[in-house]
Amino acid sequence: MQQHDIHQFLVRYFKENDCEVAENENSLVIKLTEKMDKLLMNRPFYWHYIEKIGGVPEPMTLTLVTKKNEKTSGEFVHLGSPRLHQIFQAAKKTSQFIRMYENAEGENSAYLSLIPWLNINVKISYVCDRKKDSLLSLGLHLITGQLKENFFNQLQEKSLTPTLPDYSFPLTPLIKPKSGMNRVKKAIYAYIENGDDEWAENAKARWKEDLALLEQFYEDKEKSEAYHNEKEALQIQYEPKIKVEVINGGIYYLSQ
């Protein structure tokens, strides 16, 4: 993620959260809303006091610098900065699940029906002494039960809006979201089970080699606490594990 990408992400994030954003190519001046001030600025005592006395709130203005030069002043944000990490976490917390509608036009726009899809995006992490992450985006048709992979990429090609467009109406799902989540969950497990497990077998082989060296080192010694600690550390280091993290998801009403 380059600085230009960070700049564009910040503009979009704050505008979509109803903040006033003044920008140039180097920095952003953001007038926070009350909600965003509470979320990002760590002022619980201020907000408690204002709410207690019924005062007029004064959300802060945040200046973020995305490209340093001698004329810019403010808080520099880059991929490893605490502020950007905080904003990523806030975006994940507040925007993890959304409802969107396709802004499409049909031959007879007065009768354009929109079909409900459940989308879940997950990160699958294959963890041992090494780590590999894989992203999986699934879309479930909530009427027919059809399942599509790479669903997020297909959404990128569509014009989406959080409000229902004029002359459109959403079809009622036959599959309830809770039941749909269970179907997607089973599909994720099937994806993992059908995946290549060579990485796990290689990790176990490396684990076996290091365990043999450990046993050889302690061959003529008493199996002390240090031995057991080192053996446990090898297990933690090499034992294959698969972790699944839901990144985000939503209900999308799309045209045919």
Image (tube, rainbow, N blue to C red):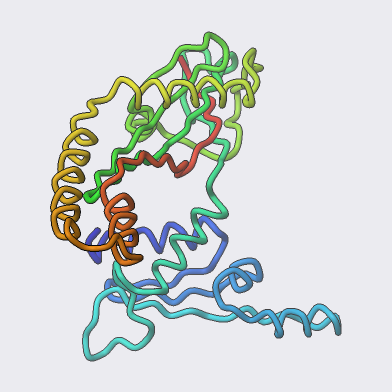
Who's the residue at 72% across and 79% down the image?
Answer: 47
The answer to whether 31 is drawn above or below residue 243 in the figure is below
Who's the residue at 64% across and 12% down the image?
Answer: 174
Q: Position of residue 243 (x, y in %)?
A: 40, 42
Residue sitting nearer the eye, 148 or 210? 210
Q: Quadrant of the C terminus?
A: top left
Who's the residue at 13% across and 54% down the image?
Answer: 216
Please identify the quarter of the rendering in which residue 199 is found. top left
Give the farthest residue toward the bottom.
70
The answer to whether 196 is drawn above or below residue 6 in the figure is above
Give the farthest residue toward the right.
53
The answer to whether 181 is drawn above or below residue 208 in the figure is above
Q: Position of residue 8 (x, y in %)?
A: 33, 60
Please identify the quarter of the rendering in which residue 181 is found. top right
Q: Position of residue 201 (x, y in %)?
A: 20, 33
Residue sitting nearer the eye, 213 or 221? 221
Who's the residue at 77% across and 80% down the image?
Answer: 48
Give the farthest residue toward the top.
144
Q: Quadrant of the N terminus?
A: bottom left
- Indicate left or right for 214 with 127 as reference: left
- Indicate left or right for 75 with 113 as reference: left
